[in-house]
Image (tube, rainbow, N blue to C red):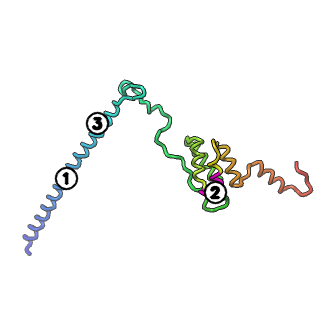
Amino acid sequence: MSQNEESVKAKEKSEQELKQLKTQYEKLLVEQEKLKDQINTVQTQNETTADITITSESVTQQDKPQSAFLSMKTSMLRREFKIQGHIGEPGHKDKLAYQSLISQIEIGLQKGYTEEEITHAVVRAVQAGLQLRSYLEGINGLTLPRLRKILRFHFQEKSATELYQLLANISQAPKESPQ
């Protein structure tokens, strides 16, 4: 093959690649126009929803500068509070420890979940078939403080006062009298 023929083939190949690039570019332009149309459609839909009347007050959005939804403290769409892990018999390694459970409850309170939501989540986290679960489900109007006491008893956790008394009794000599 001569050098002339090679240059002609290379030129034809580059022209063919250029044509392919042009068609791809034209397709991209068409897609870009479609996307612009979709964006415009969404924007017009948003503008029309801003003009919808608030039915509870029969006032249009244009007449009332602040939406009723802006005054809400919490979103109506929020995640359900869940306890990470399962509550089982005390001492099982793959189950939640008492302190971990109490920590999750405190975090839930800090995030603004109600006591009722938290108590329901804790009851759901108790392993099915445990007597604790059936006991908790049987209590009407279970409050968070009462739930904490029940959990402390279930996990056989002692309060600070009980631990102090136990420590004092252990360190006390047998002949000493309790104070």
Instruction: Nearest to the eye among marks 2 and 1: give it.
Output: 2
User: Would you say 175 lies left or right of 148 here?
Assistant: right
Q: How crowded is mark 2: few (under 14 residues within 10 Å), some or many (20 or more)?
A: few
Q: Dot 3 corresponds to which residue?
A: 44
Q: Which amino acid does label 1 sit on?
A: Lys
The number of discs equals 3
Residue situated furthest right in the rendering: 175
Residue drawn at (67%, 43%), measured in percent from left and top?
A: 145
Start-end of magenta stretch: 127-134
Q: Dot 2 corresponds to which residue?
A: 130
Residue situated furthest front in the rendering: 138
**Residue 109 % position (x, y):** 59, 43
Q: Which image quadrant for residue 89?
A: bottom right
Residue drawn at (62%, 52%), measured in percent from left and top?
A: 101
Instruction: Nearest to the eye among marks 1 and 3: give it.
Output: 3
User: Would you say 163 lies left or right of 18 here?
Assistant: right
